[in-house]
Amino acid sequence: MGRYLLEEILPFLFAGLAVTILLLLLGALQAIIAPLLAKGANPLLVAKLVALQLPYAVSQGLPIALLFATLLGLSRLAADSEIKAMQAGGVSPALLFGPVMALGLAVTLLSFGVGEVLTPRAKVQALSVQREIVLDNPRVAGLGEAGGKALVLRDAFGRAISIASIAQNGELRGLSIATLRSGDVAREIITARRGRLEPGSNVLELYDGQRITYQNERPSTVLSFQRGQLPVQDLQASFEGGDELRPIYLPLRDLYKRVQDYRSQHINAPQEFTALQRKFAEPVAALCMAFFAAALAIFSFRSSLNIGLVWVLLLTFLYYATWSVFRVMGENGAVSAVVAAWTPDLLYLLAGVALLWTAARR
């Protein structure tokens, strides 16, 4: 029975995952990829950037795909009276829960693993690819254009490198490099009129600049130079409105440490707090989805209700819409992080309990 149920659900799971990934990538295409190509970005680098979005799309898409697959597979069993045949053959419909919940647990672990191991690495590499795209074609970031914003890069040493413009020959102009302490307090600031970073090089050449060091937030030393070299490592650029990784992309250990630091300093950081809860709530959603789908199948059998494809799509979209709304509310501090992250899961869990209670009364 378990093998039969899995053979019914797994094809829909793979198909749903493929569609979900495609939709998430299409969203990235509209927001990021299409503008890059329109501004003349290297197509090979853009293709690499698209490929690096896959781990995050898989981790986000697995619970949604499972909901779609279990709803569609189990509703077909109910519609074709196979659950009725199971009961007539002496098999309790409650046995649906075993294989379905086991599949939900497997999807939960897989989603958490992909989100924790592959996604952070892919996002770091994506920031490096975005830096290559910008340095390859400055028009991508609007550098040198009227009203264009300065490009801000980050390296592994915690430095923020601001570039006002990039010349056609690749020369960087109007550089400002800030080395920050914890809490974003400047330790030193280096400015330079010109600079150059050769492709593949880990040394930033600076010309006509000044280095100012700070102690207790006050200038300590000022040094002018005509030429200098600054070692850099893993330079990254972001097209998402920020110059570092979003909290949800950080490894769990790093995110937990950041949240603990904020709480010890009584700093309200709703985006980080919500991201920490989402690390667990989003994979666990697969278990809640599996429970809800099995409960809905038993309810459909007891009430002779036919759940068609339209209802399956509607219920799947309802989770995504609820998740999106509460995520935005949590990141903006409108609701607590726990409420923002766990409400979509709780709604489907409670709906499943209500369906089982109603089916038992029938």
Image (tube, helix red, strand yellow):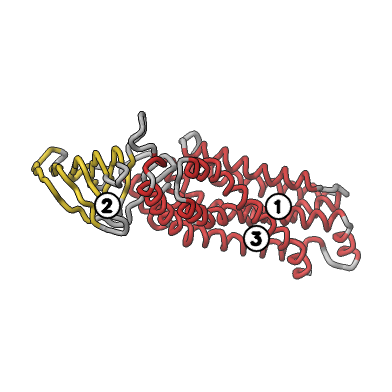
Question: Which mark, by number, is residue 104?
Answer: 3
Q: At which x and y percent is residue 103?
A: 67, 63
Within 10 Å of the Cα at label 3, are there few (<14), some (14-19), or many (20+) other Cα atoms?
many
Q: Residue furthest front?
A: 169
Callouts 1 and 3 close, C-beta under 8 Å: no
Nearer-N-terminus badge (2/3): 3
Question: Which mark, by number, is residue 197?
Answer: 2
Q: Is residue 165 above or below residue 158?
A: above
Q: Residue shown at 69%/57% (left/top)?
A: 15
Question: Which mark, by number, is residue 126?
Answer: none
**Three-letter amino acid code at the position of disc 2:** Leu
Q: At which x and y percent is residue 279?
A: 50, 53
| Visible residue check, residue 256 | no
Q: Residue shown at 24%/41% (left/top)?
A: 175
Tag nearer the camera, 1 or 3: 1
Nearer-N-terminus badge (1/3): 1
Image-based side of 33 in relation to 143, left or right: right
Within 10 Å of the Cα at label 1, are there few (<14), some (14-19), or many (20+) other Cα atoms?
many
Nearer-N-terminus badge (1/2): 1
Q: At which x and y percent is residue 190?
A: 18, 44
Question: Which mark, by number, is residue 68?
Answer: 1
**Three-letter amino acid code at the position of disc 1:** Phe
Nearer to the camera, 15 or 92: 15
